[in-house]
Amino acid sequence: MPSPTEDAEPPSGGSVSSGEAAGPPIAATEPMWREIFSPHGLVGIAWCIFQIGVALWPYVDELVTRCAHVSFALSLAILWTSRKSHRPVKRFNFALAIFALVPPFIIWASLARINDRTTGLDPLAPLDYVGALIILVLLFEISRRVLGVGMTALALVFVAYQFFGGNLPGLLSHNAADFTEFIDIQFLTIEGVFGVPTGVSVRLVFYFILFAAVYETFGGGKMIIDLSLALTGARKGGPAKAAVVASGLMGSVSGSAVANVMSTGIFTIPLMKRIKYDARFAGAVEAVASTGGQIMPPVMGAAAFVMADFLQVPYGQIVIAAALPALLYFVCVLISVDLEARRRGLPTIGREEIPRIGQTLKNLGHMMVPLVWLTYRIVAGYDITALIIEVIGLTIAIGTLRRSTRVGPAAVLTSLVTAATRSINVAIPCALASLIVSVIAFTSLGTKFTSMILNVAGGEVTVLLGLAMAATLILGAGMPTTSAYIMGAVLIAPALIEFGTNPLVAHFFVFYFAIMSMLTPPVALSAYAAASISGSSPSATGWQALLLALPGFIIPYAIVINPGLLLVGPIEGTLLGLFSVLIGLCCVSAAVIGWLFKPLSIIARVFVALAAVGVLWPEVWVSLSVGSVLIVGSVWLYLTSRHKAKVLDAPLC
């Protein structure tokens, strides 16, 4: 079942034109107030106020804060998913939403006793069972509604393993937990449902989502889209390139693939279709570009914050490490859409339809200030939570100064509802992932899984990397990116580290493929969201997106071969890695599209794809030799190709 932000984006109030109109018209404001005073609107605003209060007054007990965060997410998700139900169902769900808000009060009222007790030894109070059952039962029910049956069933399998795994033979056996011990760990400690992933959602991710919603409301999203069209719209395949640039920039703010698709795709996909990109290719371009937004600094995806927590490094270090791979990913997509446009001889769009850079900067350029300030402060190492509150205030202040971006109170409050609703897609998976991680820690399953992977790999790093990629993509097929990364981080990354891989490289490898799982059928969420706009088949769009993103699959392998791509180590390693990957990306893109200055035969495509492997070879002389041959061959193809080469109108798949 689609998540709340996947089946329909809540109104953001952020559709501000680049003209000088001051705020939304009255006709647009009235639905905003109805949204604000709806049950889910009030809960969403209350959640935002609570989070802002915690940021400004960080002395609230951690267990209470995390429990309240999960409770707000559950309550809002119940109301959001039932908003179109019949009246009796709505009433039942309204009662459930109220129950969902009870557990943090139970913990708060018993805080002195909880802090003084010893986990696993002191008895539980009756209310402890009540609060735990409310959280756990509603968590699984909301997971079913929001994340689908796959993720929910996987979590139930882990819970069953904790209770009954002692009956299994051999390596998988462990000392099983009883019900009281399970409740104790899951509800009364920060090692269960309120564990590390939930903590990251509370302390970091929520605030970035809030910033993204406020930034869009004050015209930041429109500025990004207009600038992207102004820079690329008149070029070959302009709308597709604009989609790539806009989605990358939007991803640097929102960190959500589906949110990127829904915010930029409504503009770029119709433009692509207008210049005769077929519907599924247009949807695939948007899906691939939007998915890459999760590795685009400074915000990236929620999993990046979890990675920083796992590695115990400042988030700014993750941002710096991700910069070059992110740029390479978007270069890869730009190459692919350019080759496809040339392969099919697609026209450009008229200059009268392209926004002017000067006019865009005049009306909306001031909205660059919050982004620049945010990037600078993150890299400089400032406290993230305090920084985001600061940047949100800066966005409101700067946006209000100009008539072109000024909005009314209704739009600002609606952006809070939007932020809270989008946060469901992070808070619920993080809570469920926290539960799974606690089971893995309790049963020592992570250590056992690492041993199993190493045994299967048999000492071959290529086999190990292939297993790690396949396992992460399979995990991601049934869960959101954050959950897929967390599972990979506790089950797969330790095997890579045990093999001798740098911990940052190992986690980035898993992180990258957890993101790419958003594009791999049978469950390609970002492609499905794009298909809903383009009007193409979701399955066909998913396969097309996978083909388009295929060149990008070499980037994490290249990082393992040359960690300098994460901007660690000597500069010559970074430069060599950059040379190898750029040539490799061009090769694989040309092989997938079937065009390099002229149509490529099947034999030529296979040769070019194999050459990409050679240019990425760990031996420097092999990489440079193959790369030089490829450059010479490309120049020869260019010089011998006819300027009016036959174009092909067939889709890729």
Image: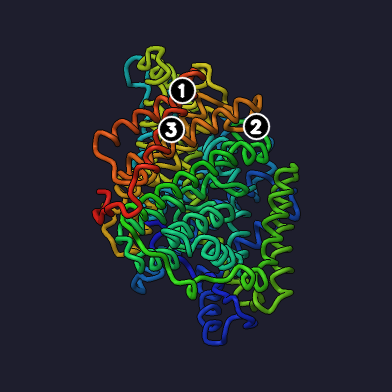
Tag shown at residue 632? 3
Corner quadrant of residue 590: top left
Corner quadrant of residue 502: top right
Q: Is residue 526 above or below residue 114?
A: below
- Badge 2 density bin: few <14, some 14–19, many ≥20, Cα 10 Å: few
Indicate which label's residue lies in the foreground, 1 or 3.
Answer: 3
Residue at the image position 27 percent from the left and 49 percent from the top: 652
Instruction: Please indicate whether residue 401 sits to the left or right of residue 650 in the image.
Output: right
Q: Earlier in the sequence, mark 1 or mark 2?
A: 2
Q: Amino acid at mark 1?
A: Ser
Q: Earlier in the sequence, mark 2 or mark 3?
A: 2
Residue at the image position 46 percent from the left and 59 percent from the top: 243
| Residue beneath disc 2 | 312
| Residue beneath disc 1 | 625
Front residue of 105 and 315: 315
Alpha-carbon distance for marks 1 and 2?
40 Å
